[in-house]
Image (tube, grey):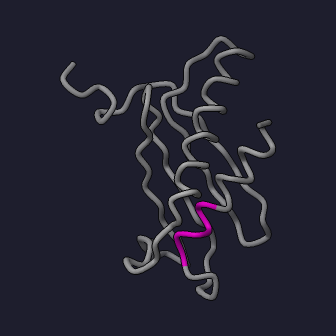
């Protein structure tokens, strides 16, 4: 896997959470990356409104597995190339297929657990 493939997986999985016929200004996926698991939240923004995924849309299991692989690849690749550990990322996709990615360098409460 390379970085471009990982970003492509993030975009495809994010888009799979929503009805492709619904308009949006941006789609957003927030990932928390632990040692062996990830947690994700996804949102669709249109105008000033923020919408969660439609409840009856299931993302295929293989897509979820691919998402985990992509998140772990990005985490490991950044650690190897920059020496910095990420604990999460926010991936934002726009209607013209452009995207933005922001990395989180602090553990979330979910990842801290019982600390």
Measured as percent of width and height from the top left, residue 83 is found at 65, 11
Nearer the observer, 34 or 93: 34
**Where is 77 relative to 43, above or below?**
above
Measured as percent of width and height from the top left, residue 95 is found at 72, 72
Q: How many marks?
A: 0
**Where is 35 relative to 60, above or below?**
above
Measured as percent of width and height from the top left, residue 53 is found at 44, 72
Residue 8 shown left or right of residue 79 in the figure: right
Residue 50 shown left or right of residue 91 in the figure: left
Write the residue at 52% across / 54% down: 64
Residue farthest toward the left in the current orientation of the protein: 114
Magenta segment main secondary structure: helix
Write the residue at 60% across / 28% down: 75
Write the residue at 58% across / 86% down: 22
- Look at the image and tell me in which quarter the N terminus lies: top right
Residue 16 is one of the magenta-drawn residues: yes
Residue 17 is one of the magenta-drawn residues: yes
Residue farthest toward the front in the current orientation of the protein: 62
**Where is 15 relative to 87, above or below?**
below
Residue 35 shown left or right of residue 46 in the figure: left
The boundaries of the magenta stretch are: 13-18
Write the residue at 58% across / 65% down: 27
Nearer the observer, 112 or 98: 112
- Look at the image and tell me in which quarter the C terminus lies: top left
Residue farthest toward the top in the current orientation of the protein: 83
**Where is 49 relative to 8, above or below?**
below
**Residue 102 occupies which quadrant of the picture?**
top right
Measured as percent of width and height from the top left, residue 49 is found at 45, 76
């Amino acid at each position: 896997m390379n970085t471009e493939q990982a970003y492509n997986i993030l975009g495809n999985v994010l888009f799979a959470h929503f009805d492709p016929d619904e308009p949006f200004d941006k789609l957003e996926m927030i990932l928390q990356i632990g040692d062996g698991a990830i947690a994700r939240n996804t949102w669709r923004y249109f105008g000033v409104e923020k919408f969660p995924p439609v409840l009856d849309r299931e993302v295929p299991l293989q897509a979820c597995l691919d998402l985990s692989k992509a998140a772990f690849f990005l985490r490991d690749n950044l650690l190897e190339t920059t020496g910095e550990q990420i604990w999460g990322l926010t991936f934002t996709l726009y209607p013209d297929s452009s995207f933005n990615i922001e990395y989180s360098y602090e553990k979330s409460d979910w990842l801290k657990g019982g600390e």
